[in-house]
Amino acid sequence: MNPTYDFAGQVALVTGAGSGMGRAAATAFAQAGAAVTLADVDDQALDDAARELRAQGHQVLAVTCDVTDEDQVAAMVGQTVAAFGRLDMAFNNAGIQIPPSDAADEEASVFDTVNAINLRGVWACMKHELRQMRTQGSGAIVNCSSLGGLVGIPGRASYHASKHGVIGLSGSAALEYAPRGVRINTICPGTIDTPMVASMIAKGELDRLQAEAGQPIGRLGRAEEIAAAVLWLCSPGASFVVGAVLPVDGGYVAQ
């Protein structure tokens, strides 16, 4: 059983909230009493997620946002503050995976795309969230890296570069903002049973049995397990946790 949190009166923002880990985290924040901004580039997935939470009686704002566009990111944060009056917690989760590639053959456009979303997108989101949080003098941010931010895997150089970058970005910002009352931490999911992973399996870019065997726990993770870690990092229970890099990967990086 997961711990329960009382986030009543607080405001959370989740990117990539239309599906997978983002949707699970947005749902968990809402169920804990927070008002939640759901942001995603996929309008249909965003509408479905927002409709579901509103039907349950939760306070929700849905914002279409491409995190590679800093103006859209700034507008997303601005709309959140305009709607709810503040911003207390953020999970910068929006990201993509790319097909495996020989490092000598990968197109520059692929490198640019994955870094624009996975790294620059996190940078832009955190930048504008921090502008609000430093005014408040409080806040908690969780940035989404990956087990790919902690290790290397053949064929995944560009993706792993983006996720390593998230860790460096987060650690430096965490040191800068801890004295100002804002905690920043990084989460590193393993292979999680999400629509993105299901698509990779369907395309032959990932072997499910190998992925399960690669995690000592012997299975894929669940989106709700990532959400549970995110909520803890944003909660008073993690009040002394700053600049942490938390693997939630079934033991993958402990091998």
Image (cartoon, rainbow, N blue to C red):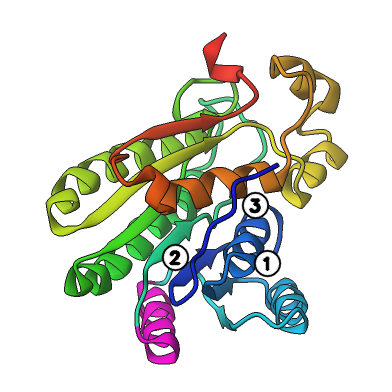
Which one is nearer the viewer's eye here, 97 or 140?
140
Q: Earlier in the sequence, mark 3 or mark 2?
A: 3
C-alpha distance separating marks 3 and 2: 19 Å
Is there a contact, CB below 8 Å, between mark 1 and mark 2?
A: no
Magenta range is: 70-85
Quarter residue 26 falls in: bottom right
Tell whether 115 sits left or right of 165.
right
Q: Which residue is mark 2?
A: 68
Label annotation for residue 21: 3
C-alpha distance separating marks 1 and 2: 17 Å
Q: Main secondary structure of the magenta part?
A: helix
Packing grade of label 1 (10 A; few <14, some 14-19, many >=20) is many
Q: Which residue is mark 1?
A: 18
Looking at the rendered image, the quarter that the C terminus falls into is top right
Q: Earlier in the sequence, mark 1 or mark 2?
A: 1
| Kind of residue at badge 2 | Thr
Packing grade of label 2 (10 A; few <14, some 14-19, many >=20) is many
Closer to viewer: mark 1 or mark 2? 1
Q: Which element type, helix, strand or loop, lies under badge 1?
A: loop
Is 131 inside the magenta-drawn segment? no
Tell whether 216 sits left or right of 251.
right
Say above or below: 183 vs 88.
above
- The structure residue drawn at horizontal position 36% and vertical position 72%, both measured from the top left corner, is 70
